[in-house]
Image (spheres, rainbow, N blue to C red):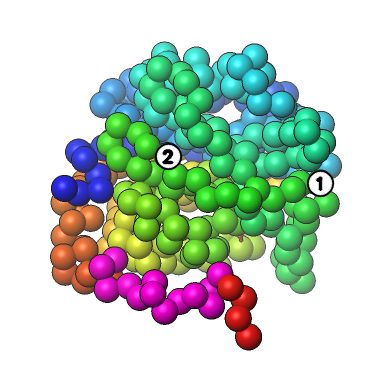
């Protein structure tokens, strides 16, 4: 039995999110998802970008953060969206305020087709970089990193979650692959410095490492905005081929995931069964 139980149609919603007004982002998001469902009514998995309803900037995270309860605006919105269209919804990310320690996380919420919140992934690896002539960004100025790998069961099988910079850390995807995921899903927001360097390579690497699908969903690029998102939302198959990709502007990426593509790859080059987890202890034990 394949890790993917049946063919699965997915839609990645690359829209111009991250405007200062949350309600405008909600409305634009709602319109795009409705368009996707009209164009591809068989879609069963919808993915939104990182920071889908607020500005992606360290100065903004705390201001826009929500405590996750049934009545928080983003939970209410995403739940309703998933229920209305009867889809599994990987709801991009939002800044999440954790009242127990007053920390803010960059959090992805996942809803099933009845609108129930079935999982949350807190971005584990914070985007702290300083690239001369390129970009300087320090998420850890205001965000805290999550501490767990997230996989979630949906009707077609299991998906693994990561948020943007998380995709640079192969171990996270490997954990999900090992748990039986058929896809890694990364709500993301690369930029015009690191996007051209590594976006496609990372998607292809994660797919080939684990012989599964990789889905990257970015915001559309908004000329003149503070953070220039790379765009290029894409779906990469288990062989490392990019089978669907957006440009830089607003666009919906559609693809059909096929169990046969996973099974064929795993038969031809069986790395998922040849892998030597019995000898890699140093990876997690920090051995000298
Ligand atoms: N939002 C992010 O985590 C950006 C990550 C990124 O651009 C990268 O190069 O990694």
Density class for disc 2 (Cα within 10 Å; few <14, some 14-19, many ≥20) is some
Q: Quadrant of residue 16?
A: top right
- Location of residue 235 with respect to 279 vertically, above or below: above
Nearer to us of marks 2 and 1 is 2
Q: Residue at x 39, y 72 (%)?
A: 277
Query: Which residues make up the magenta segment?
Result: 272-284
Residue 12 in picture, x, y percent from top left? 43, 38
Examine the residues drawn in magenta and state their main secondary structure: helix
* Left or right: where 262 falls relative to 245: left
Which residue in the protein does label 2 denote? 152
**Residue lying at the far bottom of the rendered structure:** 288
Which residue in the protein does label 1 denote? 142
Q: Residue at x 50, y 58 (%)?
A: 172
* Left or right: where 72 falls relative to 34: right
Residue 225 in picture, x, y percent from top left? 72, 42
Residue nearest the observer in this picture, 253 or 53:
53
Residue 60 in picture, x, y percent from top left? 80, 37
Magenta stretch contains residue 282? yes
- Asked if disc 2 and disc 1 are in contact, CB closer than 8 Å, the reply is no
Residue nearest the observer in this picture, 277 or 5:
277
Quarter that holds the C terminus: bottom right
Could you say whether the residue bearing mark 2 is in a helix, strand or loop? strand
């Amino acid at each position: 039995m394949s890790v993917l139980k049946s063919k699965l149609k997915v839609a990645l919603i690359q829209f111009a999110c991250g405007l200062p007004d949350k309600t405008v982002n909600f409305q634009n998001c709602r319109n795009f998802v409705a368009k996707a469902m009209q164009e591809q009514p068989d879609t069963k998995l919808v993915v939104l970008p990182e920071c889908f309803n607020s500005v992606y900037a360290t100065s903004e995270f705390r201001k826009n953060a929500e405590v996750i309860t049934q009545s928080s605006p983003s939970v209410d919105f995403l739940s309703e969206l998933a229920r209305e269209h009867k889809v599994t919804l990987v709801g991009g990310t939002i800044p999440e305020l954790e009242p127990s320690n007053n920390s803010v996380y960059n959090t992805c919420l996942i809803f099933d087709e009845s609108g129930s919140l079935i999982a949350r992934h807190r971005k584990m690896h914070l985007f702290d970089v300083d690239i001369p002539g390129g970009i300087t960004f320090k998420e850890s100025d205001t965000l805290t990193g999550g501490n767990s790998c997230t996989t979630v069961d949906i009707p077609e099988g299991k998906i693994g979650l990561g948020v943007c910079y998380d995709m640079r850390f192969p171990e996270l995807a490997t954990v999900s692959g090992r748990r039986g995921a058929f896809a890694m899903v990364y709500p993301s927001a690369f930029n015009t410095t690191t996007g051209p360097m590594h976006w496609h390579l990372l998607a292809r690497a994660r797919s080939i490492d684990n012989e599964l699908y990789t889905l990257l969903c970015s915001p559309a690029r908004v000329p003149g905005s503070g953070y220039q998102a790379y765009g290029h939302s894409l779906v990469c198959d288990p062989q490392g081929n990019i089978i669907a990709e957006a440009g830089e502007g607003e666009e919906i990426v559609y693809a059909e995931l096929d169990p046969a593509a996973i099974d064929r790859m795993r038969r031809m080059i069986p790395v998922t069964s040849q892998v030597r987890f019995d000898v890699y202890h140093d990876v997690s034990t920090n051995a000298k």
